[in-house]
Image (tube, rainbow, N blue to C red):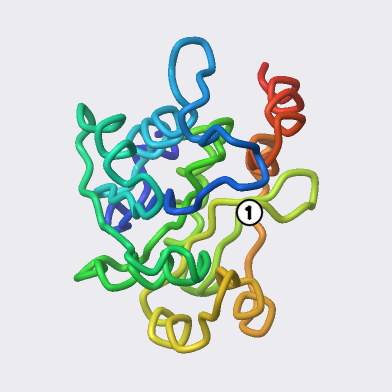
Protein backbone atom coordinates (compact mmCIF):
# COMPACT_ATOMS: atom_id res chain seq x y z
CA UNK A 1 0.00 0.00 0.00
CA UNK A 2 1.40 3.40 -0.98
CA UNK A 3 1.57 6.47 1.25
CA UNK A 4 -1.17 8.15 -0.82
CA UNK A 5 -3.46 5.19 -0.08
CA UNK A 6 -2.81 5.35 3.67
CA UNK A 7 -3.00 9.06 4.41
CA UNK A 8 -5.71 10.78 6.39
CA UNK A 9 -7.69 12.88 3.92
CA UNK A 10 -9.11 15.28 6.49
CA UNK A 11 -6.50 17.92 5.69
CA UNK A 12 -7.22 21.31 4.16
CA UNK A 13 -4.60 22.60 1.74
CA UNK A 14 -4.03 26.37 1.78
CA UNK A 15 -1.85 27.97 -0.90
CA UNK A 16 -0.55 31.41 0.03
CA UNK A 17 -0.43 33.69 -3.02
CA UNK A 18 -1.11 37.19 -1.73
CA UNK A 19 2.28 38.93 -1.80
CA UNK A 20 3.52 41.47 -4.33
CA UNK A 21 6.83 39.66 -5.13
CA UNK A 22 8.72 42.95 -4.72
CA UNK A 23 12.14 41.25 -4.49
CA UNK A 24 11.71 39.58 -7.88
CA UNK A 25 11.52 42.82 -9.84
CA UNK A 26 8.78 44.54 -11.80
CA UNK A 27 7.12 41.32 -12.95
CA UNK A 28 4.92 39.28 -10.63
CA UNK A 29 6.94 36.10 -10.12
CA UNK A 30 3.80 33.98 -9.80
CA UNK A 31 3.16 34.35 -13.54
CA UNK A 32 6.68 33.48 -14.70
CA UNK A 33 6.44 30.31 -16.79
CA UNK A 34 8.33 27.07 -16.41
CA UNK A 35 7.94 24.84 -19.46
CA UNK A 36 4.73 26.60 -20.48
CA UNK A 37 3.04 26.80 -17.08
CA UNK A 38 3.16 29.58 -14.52
CA UNK A 39 4.80 29.16 -11.13
CA UNK A 40 1.48 29.62 -9.34
CA UNK A 41 -0.30 27.07 -11.55
CA UNK A 42 2.39 24.45 -10.94
CA UNK A 43 2.33 25.05 -7.19
CA UNK A 44 -1.46 24.83 -7.11
CA UNK A 45 -1.58 21.68 -9.22
CA UNK A 46 1.05 19.97 -7.08
CA UNK A 47 -1.12 20.64 -4.03
CA UNK A 48 -4.26 19.42 -5.79
CA UNK A 49 -2.45 16.23 -6.82
CA UNK A 50 -1.54 15.47 -3.22
CA UNK A 51 -3.74 13.85 -0.57
CA UNK A 52 -5.31 17.03 0.80
CA UNK A 53 -9.09 16.97 0.96
CA UNK A 54 -9.52 20.34 -0.76
CA UNK A 55 -7.46 23.35 -1.83
CA UNK A 56 -8.04 27.02 -1.13
CA UNK A 57 -5.85 29.83 -2.46
CA UNK A 58 -5.36 33.03 -0.47
CA UNK A 59 -5.00 35.98 -2.86
CA UNK A 60 -4.14 39.63 -2.32
CA UNK A 61 -1.93 41.53 -4.75
CA UNK A 62 -3.32 41.26 -8.31
CA UNK A 63 -5.99 38.89 -7.04
CA UNK A 64 -7.98 39.16 -10.27
CA UNK A 65 -5.00 37.95 -12.32
CA UNK A 66 -4.30 35.10 -9.91
CA UNK A 67 -7.92 33.97 -10.06
CA UNK A 68 -7.90 34.14 -13.86
CA UNK A 69 -4.67 32.12 -14.00
CA UNK A 70 -6.13 29.36 -11.82
CA UNK A 71 -9.76 29.52 -12.95
CA UNK A 72 -9.57 26.10 -14.63
CA UNK A 73 -8.56 24.34 -11.41
CA UNK A 74 -10.78 22.83 -8.70
CA UNK A 75 -9.98 25.34 -5.97
CA UNK A 76 -11.63 28.05 -3.89
CA UNK A 77 -10.27 31.59 -3.63
CA UNK A 78 -9.97 33.51 -0.36
CA UNK A 79 -9.21 37.22 -0.74
CA UNK A 80 -7.02 38.87 1.88
CA UNK A 81 -7.63 42.60 1.84
CA UNK A 82 -4.82 43.16 4.34
CA UNK A 83 -2.09 41.54 2.24
CA UNK A 84 0.13 44.65 2.45
CA UNK A 85 0.57 44.07 6.20
CA UNK A 86 2.42 40.82 5.61
CA UNK A 87 2.17 37.06 5.27
CA UNK A 88 0.60 36.63 8.70
CA UNK A 89 -2.64 38.15 7.40
CA UNK A 90 -2.82 35.57 4.62
CA UNK A 91 -2.21 32.76 7.09
CA UNK A 92 -4.97 34.16 9.31
CA UNK A 93 -7.32 34.36 6.31
CA UNK A 94 -6.61 30.73 5.58
CA UNK A 95 -7.18 29.70 9.19
CA UNK A 96 -10.64 31.21 9.11
CA UNK A 97 -11.55 28.87 6.26
CA UNK A 98 -10.85 25.75 8.32
CA UNK A 99 -14.03 23.95 9.33
CA UNK A 100 -14.07 20.30 10.36
CA UNK A 101 -10.67 19.29 9.01
CA UNK A 102 -8.26 17.63 11.40
CA UNK A 103 -5.33 19.62 10.07
CA UNK A 104 -4.38 22.41 7.69
CA UNK A 105 -1.36 22.42 5.41
CA UNK A 106 0.11 25.75 4.30
CA UNK A 107 2.01 25.78 1.02
CA UNK A 108 3.57 28.75 -0.76
CA UNK A 109 2.57 29.92 -4.21
CA UNK A 110 6.18 30.64 -5.15
CA UNK A 111 7.44 27.08 -4.52
CA UNK A 112 6.73 25.17 -7.76
CA UNK A 113 9.39 22.50 -7.19
CA UNK A 114 7.67 20.88 -4.18
CA UNK A 115 6.58 17.38 -5.16
CA UNK A 116 3.09 16.14 -4.40
CA UNK A 117 4.67 13.07 -2.82
CA UNK A 118 6.45 15.32 -0.32
CA UNK A 119 3.12 16.82 0.70
CA UNK A 120 1.76 13.30 1.13
CA UNK A 121 4.61 12.47 3.50
CA UNK A 122 3.56 15.36 5.75
CA UNK A 123 -0.07 14.26 5.69
CA UNK A 124 0.89 10.69 6.45
CA UNK A 125 3.15 11.73 9.34
CA UNK A 126 0.42 13.74 11.07
CA UNK A 127 -1.71 10.63 11.30
CA UNK A 128 0.39 9.65 14.32
CA UNK A 129 -0.85 11.91 17.13
CA UNK A 130 1.98 10.79 19.39
CA UNK A 131 4.77 12.47 17.45
CA UNK A 132 3.63 16.08 17.39
CA UNK A 133 1.20 18.77 16.34
CA UNK A 134 3.27 20.66 13.77
CA UNK A 135 4.95 18.95 10.82
CA UNK A 136 7.50 20.68 8.61
CA UNK A 137 8.82 19.42 5.29
CA UNK A 138 12.58 19.00 5.34
CA UNK A 139 15.43 17.85 3.17
CA UNK A 140 18.83 16.79 4.40
CA UNK A 141 17.92 17.94 7.90
CA UNK A 142 17.04 21.47 6.76
CA UNK A 143 13.64 22.99 7.47
CA UNK A 144 11.53 24.06 4.49
CA UNK A 145 7.90 24.23 3.37
CA UNK A 146 5.02 23.23 3.35
CA UNK A 147 4.03 23.17 7.02
CA UNK A 148 1.11 21.21 8.47
CA UNK A 149 -0.67 22.19 11.69
CA UNK A 150 -3.04 19.89 13.54
CA UNK A 151 -6.35 21.56 14.42
CA UNK A 152 -5.56 21.53 18.15
CA UNK A 153 -2.97 24.32 17.74
CA UNK A 154 -4.78 26.56 15.24
CA UNK A 155 -6.36 28.93 17.78
CA UNK A 156 -3.01 29.50 19.48
CA UNK A 157 -1.34 30.07 16.11
CA UNK A 158 -3.85 32.72 15.09
CA UNK A 159 -3.33 34.61 18.34
CA UNK A 160 0.41 35.11 17.76
CA UNK A 161 0.42 36.00 14.06
CA UNK A 162 1.98 39.40 13.41
CA UNK A 163 3.12 41.34 10.32
CA UNK A 164 5.28 39.40 7.89
CA UNK A 165 5.80 36.60 10.43
CA UNK A 166 4.01 33.59 9.00
CA UNK A 167 4.30 31.47 12.13
CA UNK A 168 8.00 30.65 12.47
CA UNK A 169 8.28 31.87 16.06
CA UNK A 170 5.18 29.86 16.99
CA UNK A 171 6.70 26.75 15.44
CA UNK A 172 9.89 27.30 17.44
CA UNK A 173 8.01 27.76 20.70
CA UNK A 174 5.64 24.82 20.30
CA UNK A 175 8.13 22.49 18.65
CA UNK A 176 7.91 20.64 15.38
CA UNK A 177 8.40 17.29 13.75
CA UNK A 178 10.75 17.62 10.80
CA UNK A 179 9.60 15.25 8.07
CA UNK A 180 12.43 14.20 5.78
CA UNK A 181 11.19 14.26 2.19
CA UNK A 182 14.39 13.85 0.20
CA UNK A 183 12.98 16.63 -1.99
CA UNK A 184 15.21 19.69 -2.45
CA UNK A 185 12.17 21.51 -3.83
CA UNK A 186 10.86 22.03 -0.28
CA UNK A 187 13.82 24.36 0.32
CA UNK A 188 13.39 26.51 -2.80
CA UNK A 189 11.06 29.49 -2.69
CA UNK A 190 11.36 31.85 -5.64
CA UNK A 191 12.21 35.34 -4.38
CA UNK A 192 14.70 36.29 -7.10
CA UNK A 193 15.57 35.29 -10.64
CA UNK A 194 18.61 33.50 -9.22
CA UNK A 195 16.31 31.40 -7.00
CA UNK A 196 14.40 30.31 -10.09
CA UNK A 197 17.58 29.31 -11.88
CA UNK A 198 18.79 27.35 -8.85
CA UNK A 199 15.44 25.60 -8.59
CA UNK A 200 15.95 23.84 -11.89
CA UNK A 201 18.92 22.07 -10.34
CA UNK A 202 16.54 20.33 -7.92
CA UNK A 203 14.60 18.55 -10.62
CA UNK A 204 15.52 15.00 -11.46
Residue drawn at point x = 66 percent, y = 78 percent: 169
Q: Depth check: 133 or 97 in front? A: 97
Residue 100 horizontal/vertical position (percent):
20, 70
As drawn, 62 above or below 74: below
Question: Quadrant of residue 183 in the image?
Answer: top right
- Give the structural element (helix, strand or loop) at label 1: strand
As drawn, 73 above or below 75: above
Residue 119 shown left or right of residue 198 in the figure: left
The N terminus - image quarter: top left
Residue 21 horizontal/vertical position (percent):
57, 45
Residue drawn at point x = 63 percent, y = 54 percent: 179
Residue 96 shown left or right of residue 182 in the figure: left
Question: Quadrant of residue 97 in the image?
Answer: bottom left
Q: Residue furthest top?
A: 35
Residue 5 shown left or right of residue 25 in the figure: left
Residue drawn at point x = 36 percent, y = 75 percent: 151
Give the labeled residue for mark 1: 179
Residue 142 shown left or right of residue 12 in the figure: right
Residue 84 horizontal/vertical position (percent):
47, 65
Amino acid sequence: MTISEQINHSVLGILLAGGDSSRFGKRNKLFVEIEGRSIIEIAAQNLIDSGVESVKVVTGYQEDLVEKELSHLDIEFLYNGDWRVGQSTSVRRGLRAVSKEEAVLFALGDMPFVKSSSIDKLIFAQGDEEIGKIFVAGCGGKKGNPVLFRSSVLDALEEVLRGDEGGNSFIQNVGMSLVETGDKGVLCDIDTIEDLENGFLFEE
